[in-house]
Image (cartoon, helix red, strand yellow):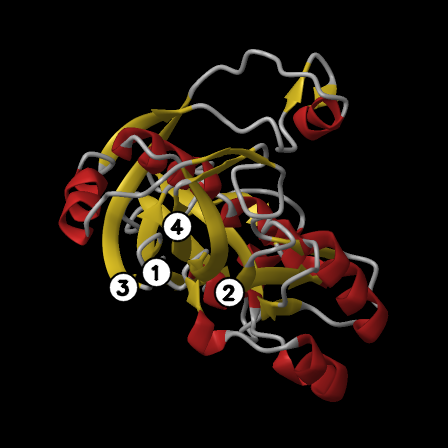
């Protein structure tokens, strides 16, 4: 059965779940999940986890993400991107220097109000369903972090290309909306390309057509996702059996920390935490 990770360069017009469904069909494997939703208009890095690797998907959401975003000043829409209805249109007087100065004020820890057109649930209802009915409800601000934000290019008098490195939960279209508000002319997102997610970059990404042609050959090993952690190989078959039976093992020489744990034949068994000489599994990757 196929197991591993494939980094898809998501095409525009596809939902993240559309991509998973396509890969499910190509690889004939029901267990397929992604590591971080991209809006249909967005393109770029979408890590897709297949088979046993789906157990790693929960770890993919928490890392930094990098985007190249198109900011269009002078336009405000109900979706905060160009797919929505125009609410306001304004003359743009902002210069490149003024845009760069404004970007600096959005660096660091911020409180961001999620857009109405999002999948967040309030009282059991997704916001975008309420928005489509013309309803707007109060949303609590969420804590996010903008680690890097720079102006790459001024494309026209109204259009600017930005690079943003941000935390989980950041809405880039809301960031563009808020930058426009700060400049006094409004703003919206006109393009979005994710260039890094879960530690994977566009250099590792492949197209759906390539997956169709090459199938399982393009799957990266699951343990590659955890390469930042040191490797630990069990010393005996008996200790490996304990791990496979769901039990911790002890090693008084092992410093506290998180480890990639391997079996006697090199199989990636689990991601484990060592504490006080006891190694306990955080997530297992063996078995069916």
Secondary structure, mark 2, is helix
Count up the numbered dots.
Answer: 4
For mark 1, give the secondary structure: loop
Select label 4 or label 1 by which is in front.
Answer: 4
Q: Nearer the viewer, residue 9 or 163?
A: 163
> Of the residues tagged 2 and 3, which is closer to the observer?
3
Q: Secondary structure at mark 3?
A: strand
Counting from the top left corner in percent of width and height, residue 226 is at 44, 59
Front: mark 2 or 4: 4
Q: Position of residue 223 (x, y in %)?
A: 51, 65
**Residue at x 39%, y 41% (from the top left corner):** 74
Which of the 4 image quarters holds residue 233? bottom left
Callout 3 environment at 10 Å: few (<14), some (14 to 19), or many (20+)? Answer: few
Q: Are marks 2 and 3 in contact (CB under 8 Å)?
A: no
Q: Earlier in the sequence, mark 2 or mark 3?
A: 3
Mark closer to the chain start, 1 or 3 = 3
Mark 1–mark 2 distance (CA, rounded to whole Å):
11 Å
Q: Is residue 288 visible?
A: no
Density class for disc 2 (Cα within 10 Å; few <14, some 14-19, many ≥20) is many
Image location (x, y in percent) of residue 31: 77, 57
Residue under label 4, please give it.
Answer: 71
Q: Which residue is mark 2?
A: 223
Front-most of residues 58 and 131: 131
- N-term mark: 2 or 4: 4
Above-or-below relation of 207 to 173 = below
Q: CA distance from mark 3 to mark 4?
A: 11 Å
Q: Quadrant of the N terminus?
A: bottom right
What residue did someone put label 1 on?
Answer: 230
């Amino acid at each position: 059965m196929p197991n591993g990770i494939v980094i898809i360069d998501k095409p525009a017009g596809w939902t993240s779940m559309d991509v998973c469904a396509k890969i499910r069909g190509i690889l004939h494997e029901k267990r397929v999940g992604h590591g971080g939703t991209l809006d249909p208009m967005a393109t770029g890095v979408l890590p897709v986890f297949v088979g046993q690797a789906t157990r790693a998907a929960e770890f993919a959401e928490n890392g930094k993400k990098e985007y190249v975003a198109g900011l269009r000043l002078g336009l405000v829409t109900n979706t905060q991107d160009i797919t929505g209805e125009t609410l306001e249109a304004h003359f743009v007087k902002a210069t490149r220097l003024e845009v760069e100065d404004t970007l600096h004020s959005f660096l660091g820890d911020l409180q961001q109000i999620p857009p109405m057109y999002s999948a967040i649930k309030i009282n059991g209802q997704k916001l975008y369903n309420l928005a489509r009915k013309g309803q707007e409800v109060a949303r609590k601000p969420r804590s996010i972090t903008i680690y890097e934000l720079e102006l790459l290019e001024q494309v026209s008098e109204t259009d600017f290309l930005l690079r943003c490195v941000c935390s989980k939960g950041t809405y880039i279209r809301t960031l563009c909306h808020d930058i426009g508000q700060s400049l006094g002319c409004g703003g919206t997102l006109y393009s979005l390309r994710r260039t890094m997610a879960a530690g994977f970059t566009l250099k590792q990404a492949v197209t759906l057509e390539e997956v169709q042609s090459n199938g399982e050959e393009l799957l990266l090993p699951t343990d590659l996702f955890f390469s930042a952690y040191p490797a630990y190989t069990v010393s005996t078959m008996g200790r490996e059996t304990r791990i496979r039976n769901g039990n911790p093992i002890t090693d008084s020489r092992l410093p506290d920390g998180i480890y990639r744990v391997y079996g006697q034949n090199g199989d990636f068994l689990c991601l484990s935490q060592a504490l006080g000489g006891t190694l306990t599994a955080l997530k297992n990757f063996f078995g069916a």
